[in-house]
Amino acid sequence: STLQPRAEQDTRPRRHHSHMGDLPHTSALWSGVGAGESAESRTRASEAVACARSLRTILTNVLELPSKLEYRRLRATGGAFERRVGRCTGGLAVLRAAGFEQQELAGASWWTLREVNEPLLFAIRREIDLGLAAAARLQHEAARRR
């Protein structure tokens, strides 16, 4: 089975062209998650969950303190950000969707959010929450089958 969030009182017509069509800002992050029970598939799911948790923290920090530059500027290389988000399939696509742009400053590469669009950030964080909940359900179902 593929990773799909449960609809929550959603009366919109269902989209059938993408397995994550209801998560337009984060679908690249969840691509391939839940597609199988191989060790590779479990690793991909684990990486996507770690990335999603990091992205959720980034968005929450910006939403709670939008004027704080350290939450709106992320060093692109080295450290936890590169390991958890930069190397994760779909992680940078989610950052771009939130409005972050890559910049070179003082010889270093950064992801910077110039304008805080709160409704967009809340929507993306909600998508992350739905994806995390669906991933947890899939992990639970897979563990029951083993």
Image (tube, grey):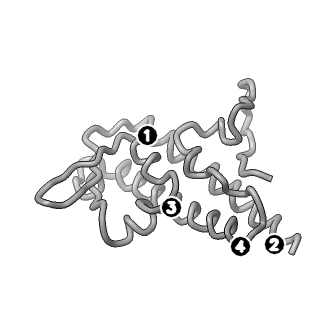
Q: Does the CB distance between marks 2 and 1 fall below 8 Å?
A: no
The local secondary structure at tag 2 comes to: helix
Q: Does the CB distance between marks 2 and 4 fall below 8 Å?
A: no
Q: Position of residue 72 (x, y in %)?
A: 28, 51
| Residue matched to label 3 | 51
Q: Reading the chain from its start, which is encountered first: label 1 or label 3?
A: 3
Q: Is residue 53 left or right of residue 34?
A: left
Numbered-mark total:
4
* Above/below status of 87 relative to 72: below
Q: Residue at x 81, y 72 (%)?
A: 143
| Residue matched to label 4 | 39
Hey, what amino acid is under mark 2? Ala
| Residue matched to label 1 | 97
Circle 2 crowding by C-alpha within 10 Å: few under 14, some 14–19, many from 20? few
| Residue matched to label 2 | 143
Q: Residue at x 69, y 68 (%)?
A: 42
